[in-house]
């Protein structure tokens, strides 16, 4: 059954009921709050929620879910709202459930190397806590200063260290959820080994809040890396990047391997607050990182760099010699997303297996360039794991609506290529509302039916984030 609001009750009456479920002052319905909490980082859909509610306990979340089932009110889980697929956007009279007051690390266990987090813990907060205790939380990306652990689980966030550490999924030891039915489930009990049937924890990771709420998550931590060192290399063309990856991977344990185009670098340079890596202009750049634990490792890196120059793959390069230089090199990559956001980019987050990347990128580049030669395309991404971010910047002379309409046509072509290469239309940002009409390019019709059946088990009344992943 699809969720639709009870017509016999008005908004104010529903909001009055909602207020009885949480502490005084923890329901907001003023215009500014609706606008602020009703959207994520995307600009496609106008926010229009009914209200925002801030639970402080699991029991309050459960009470909200039970009430929503009774009243057939849709709920939208909201984290740091840095999402890039409109998965946390409430554009249809929903109640947004925000976790700003469930933002504590409840327990740190140094023996198990785990931290029990409430969903509103900011990703960077967990990274800092780990660091203070000589440990490491490795899921990292440019928005980690704002995104929440609950949102990271909702999207199965990836980022810049996936090549070594994997996605958020790899770091969730266990979790407590309130399902769309209103039941509280403890999933996996933080165990390393647990062979007792279905691992339902995995279903909630990447579910975009469509099955229920994550109200507690035990996150694994790792040993702290030693002497992280970055190199930025300018390559002769895109095809040179893959042999460079191969050459470095055969000599070193890489913690990151990112790439960006000259256009991406030019946008970051234009900010004026990041030093240029070197004077030589190159069409593409690779940023790689490794632990320089001994002088021998650093020497291996330099020898590999020289080999790549000799092979004609690399034109120039630089290696960090200090923490400050490491951070400056990372800014070249990490600032791209935020810097181009002023150009209303149409973002695609696509992936194929690593070996297919060069042919795939050439096909996509050709088709977009052929049909829209005036569009400025900015490529960057986590190429070490096959994840490319294709960003098309809005020309000044086009309105936002005209531009997005043209991009919808581009989408079809790009996703046809993705399908042909057996890739994914969303590597790490999620489906949300921006990709839901294209899901069949990555998932078969039968698979989608199974996914809908799973949703119906956890959320029989369809109150959890309707319209995300699938259309309602
Ligand atoms: C500059 C920039 C760079 C980025 N780089 C990357 C990157 O490299 N890699 C990457 O993966 N992402 C990246 N992102 C996207 C984004 O930061 C991630 O998707 C992040 O995981 C979203 O977390 P959030 O807390 O902001 O979630 P939100 O945007 O608030 O929500 C995301 C989803 O999770 C659901 N959700 C939130 N809380 C809960 C909960 N408690 N229970 C159940 N569901 C919940 C929401 O309903 C929604 O479906 C980037 C974004 C920006 C702006």
Image (spheres, rainbow, N blue to C red):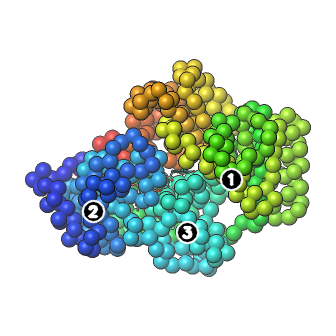
Local secondary structure at mark 3: helix
- On the image, the x and y values in percent for residue 65 come to 27, 63
Please name which of the two marks, 2 or 3, marks the residue nearer to the observer.
2
Q: Taking 356 as reference, is 216 above or below it?
A: below
Residue receiving disc 3: 126
Residue receiving disc 1: 330
Residue receiving disc 2: 28
Give whichever of discs 1 and 2 has the lower sequence position: 2
Instruction: Check contact, mark 1 vs mark 2: CB within 8 A.
Output: no
Residue 405, by quadrant, is top left
What is the distance, in whole Å, between disc 2 and disc 3 at their CAs? 28 Å
Give whichever of discs 3 and 1 has the lower sequence position: 3
Local secondary structure at mark 2: strand
Residue at 76%, 47% in the rendered image: 277
Give whichever of discs 2 and 3 has the lower sequence position: 2
Nearer the observer, 134 or 471: 134
């Amino acid at each position: 059954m699809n969720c639709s609001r009870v017509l016999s009750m008005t908004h104010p009456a529903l909001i009055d009921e909602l207020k009885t479920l949480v502490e005084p002052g923890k329901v907001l319905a003023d215009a500014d709050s609706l606008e602020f909490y009703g959207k994520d980082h995307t600009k496609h859909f106008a926010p229009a929620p009914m209200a925002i509610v801030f639970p402080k306990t699991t029991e309050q979340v459960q009470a909200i879910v039970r009430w929503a089932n009774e009243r057939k009110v849709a709920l939208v889980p909201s984290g740091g709202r840095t999402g890039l697929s409109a998965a946390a956007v409430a554009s249809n009279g929903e109640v947004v459930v925000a976790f700003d007051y469930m933002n504590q690390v409840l327990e740190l266990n140094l023996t198990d190397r785990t931290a029990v987090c409430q969903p509103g813990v900011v990703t960077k907060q967990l990274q800092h806590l780990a660091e203070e205790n000589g440990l490491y939380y490795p899921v990292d990306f440019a928005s980690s200063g704002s995104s929440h652990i609950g949102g990271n689980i909702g999207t199965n966030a990836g980022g810049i260290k996936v090549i070594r550490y994997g996605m958020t999924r790899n770091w969730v030891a266990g979790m407590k959820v309130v399902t769309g039915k209103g039941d509280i489930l403890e999933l996996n009990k933080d165990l390393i080994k647990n062979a007792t049937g279905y691992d339902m924890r995995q279903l909630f990771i990447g579910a975009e809040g469509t099955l229920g709420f994550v109200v507690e998550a035990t996150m694994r931590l790792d040993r702290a890396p030693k002497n992280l060192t970055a190199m930025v290399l300018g390559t002769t063309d895109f095809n040179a990047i893959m042999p460079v990856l191969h050459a470095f991977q055969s000599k070193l344990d890489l913690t990151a391997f990112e790439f960006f185009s000259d256009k991406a670098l030019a946008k970051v340079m234009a900010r004026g607050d990041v030093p240029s890596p070197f004077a030589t202009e190159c069409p593409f750049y690779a940023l790689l990182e490794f632990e320089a634990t001994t002088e021998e490792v650093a020497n291996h890196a330099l020898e590999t760099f020289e080999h790549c120059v000799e092979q004609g793959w690399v034109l120039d390069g630089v290696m960090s010699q200090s923490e400050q230089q490491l951070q400056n090199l990372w800014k070249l990559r990490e600032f791209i997303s935020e810097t181009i956001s002023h150009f209303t980019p149409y973002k695609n987050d696509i992936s194929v297996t690593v070996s297919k990347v060069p042919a795939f990128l050439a096909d996509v580049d050709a088709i977009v360039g052929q049909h829209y030669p005036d569009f400025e395309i900015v490529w960057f991404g986590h190429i070490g794991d096959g994840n490319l971010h294709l960003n098309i910047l809005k020309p000044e002379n086009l309105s936002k609506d005209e531009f997005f309409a043209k991009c919808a046509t581009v989408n079809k072509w790009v996703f046809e290529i993705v399908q042909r290469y057996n890739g994914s239309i969303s590597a790490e940002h999620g489906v949300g509302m921006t990709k839901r009409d294209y899901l069949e390019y990555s998932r078969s019709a039968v698979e989608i039916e199974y996914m809908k059946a799973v949703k119906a088990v956890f959320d029989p009344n369809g109150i959890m984030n309707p319209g995300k992943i699938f259309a309602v």
